[in-house]
Image (tube, rainbow, N blue to C red):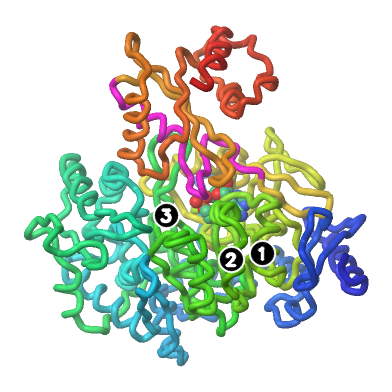
Amino acid sequence: MASNIRTNNYLRHVESMKLMPSGAGHISHLNAVVLGDSLATEEDDFVLPSEEFASQANIQSPEQYLKMYKRSIEDPAGFWSEIAEEFYWKQKWGHKVCDENFDVRKGNIKIEWFKGGITNICYNCLDRNVEAGLGDKVAIYWEGNEPGLDDTLTYTQLLQQVCQLANYLKDNGVKKGDAVIIYLPMLMELPIAMLACARIGAVHSVVFAGFSAEALAQRIIDCKPKVVITCNAVKRGPKVLHLKDIVDVAIKDSAKNGVPIDKCLVYENSWATKREDTKWEDGRDVWWQDVVPQYPTSCPVEWVDAEDPLFLLYTSGSTGKPKGVLHTTGGYMVYTATTFKYAFDYKQSDIYWCTADCGWITGHSYVTYGPMLNGASVIVYEGAPNYPDAGRCWDIVDKYKVTIFYTAPTLVRSLMRDGDGFVTRYSRKSLRVLGSVGEPINPSAWRWFYNVIGDSRCPISDTWWQTETGGFMITPLPGAWPQKPGSATFPFFGVQPVIVDENGVEIEGECSGYLCVKKSWPGAFRTLFGDHERYETTYFKPFAGYYFSGDGCSRDKDGYHWLTGRVDDVINVSGHRIGTAEVESALVSHPKCAEAAVVGVEHAVKGQGIYAFVTVVDGVPYSEELRKDLILIVRKQIGAFAAPDKIHWAPGLPKTRSGKIMRRILRKIASRQLDELGDTSTLADPNVVNQLIELADS
Ligand code: WTA
């Protein structure tokens, strides 16, 4: 139990949250622990910031938050333009800070922020910081897969390397608005490549280097890049992955589909394989090290409109085709920088490590742009978090004196399983703020993260957001919030989350429903590349007048938000979004597979696992070999991370009379909740359910 003075203070603070539009603030009882005081136990509903932490924080109390939050909602133009002024604009935006139509009933969805403002995000990340005297500050601490292998780049050096690559790209015909595909692991060259594209106004599309050749080809075909940037290979843990081979297959495939690639820039990652061992196509393939260093270390900036595209990032949806989420420049810049600063309570002295790969949105917003816009020192780690053993993360934390550590619940759970010993043998004294992203963090993992990793000293920012939102939407502010283990707490400035029922009616107070957002925020995505209609249909039509997140959420009596996972056909495996339709279409492309239905099941480490019901073609026997083949085909078409955990042979699938698969029943069978199957009478053939149950463990 916390000291009473502190607790009562907070009670008063939290009471003031009644003013929140969500109706927060009636705290009837308060079992709490204060940061640094003692372990958080199951009896504790709250974890309170210590006086010491709060007094140095950027936002020090719920009241301070509330004042800023209210302003951000009542006067978004004033609130955001004041923040935007801190960046460099070649020319200021026009008279409208935000111009939006968020309601499909009133016409096409449109979101614009700072339109008419001319700027460049690379300039704001690098040149501006160098000019402000941060030139000698380390921008990137790079840590290789193998312990002992590392490198650093100061802001000045990073700027020079970015300029060299930008000059190379320009010289090879890449112009403003052209797409560039980046298929790289976590080398320093990955953020370098992103920033180089941004510098010349090119639109980068980073493809996570765990995606297969087919998935890469699909993305190349969609965005038709001028150049593909990759490396020969990478070592991740004990394994060597030959990325260039994958790119070769993808480029061949895309050429067959009418999208030839003339230039493939290959970084030689000699720690993984040698140049001589890399397959090569003269004329098309060029070694990065042979050409890029020859270019000048300065490169003029291409000034772009705030609404010019910055990047495309493909993400899974509920149909087979990945969606090209498009983010623009100005609003994204202001939003990622601001969310980073407040949600992690960032200070210039911090050393920041986000374990995400730049192949996902987290790596875009919170490895590259958000931190660098703040002039932060960022760790870029190439390897696997448990290599050579489960203590590697804390080894890295101690080596660089990391102060802010941002990761995913799946890693927390997997390290928790490996035992406290791997953690406690390291000091971790430098840590002051922890962060979580990608999926709901279960309270027991939260407590372990807090008690063991953070020694009960560090607040946890459980940040809820999405590829589409560009930056944090619901997140604790570490010095302000009393936290509840497992809750993402309250909205960030300018964000108005609402929970609606199935009819799209907002529900107040304590409730559960669909999580939507009212009104735009600067970091919102502007469209799906080449398919504005799908953008409107997926996100704005389900509940007219709102952006629909695809997530379920409940709000408790104190106004805290608890994310409950996807409510659409998307599975979240280790924080990676995977569309069930994508996995199904890979499975049915196997000639022996007649039909497939994929659902998510609870998984102790990954959060959700992939569970596939498969009907084979008539006359084909089930076999272990076929099972392996089916898993392989998913690995090949999407990537290893999407491989099903379980194949369940299904002589038939439960369908309604109109032929719709009843996934609700499949989910219950997959999780063996057999007494909760519900009404099966509407099935065309109720008997298939019994057959499936019989075959469950075969
Ligand atoms: C889930 C990752 C609960 C959610 C930034 C969302 C979360 C999807 C959280 C987006 C969180 C992300 N708590 N759920 N803190 N963060 N999610 O696009 O289901 O890869 O819709 O963006 O991850 O995944 P995405």
Find out whether residue 567 is within the magenta segment: yes
The residue at the point 56 percent across, 27 percent down is: 670
Residue that sits furthest to the bottom in the current view: 133
Find out whether residue 50 is within the magenta segment: no
The three-letter amino acid code for the residue at tag 3 is Leu
Where 544 sits versus 684, above or below? below
Residue 198 visible here: no
Report the Cα–Cα distance between label 1 and label 3.
Answer: 39 Å
Asked if residue 27 lies left or right of residue 130, the reply is: right
Assess whether mark 1 and mark 2 are in contact (beta carbons under 8 angstroms).
yes
Where 468 sits versus 376, above or below? above
> Which residue, given by chain and number where applicable, does mark 2 sit on?
423
Front residue of 202/164: it is: 164
The residue at the point 35 percent across, 78 percent down is: 151
The residue at the point 26 percent across, 54 percent down is: 243
The residue at the point 77 percent across, 64 percent down is: 39
> Which residue, given by chain and number where applicable, does mark 1 sit on?
452
Q: Which mark is residue 326?
A: 3
Where are the magenta residues, as a range? 564-591
Where 114 sits versus 348, above or below? above
The crowd level at tag 3 (other Cα within 10 Å; few <14, some 14-19, many 20+) is many
Report the Cα–Cα distance between label 2 and label 1.
Answer: 7 Å
Asked if residue 371 lies left or right of residue 639, the reply is: right
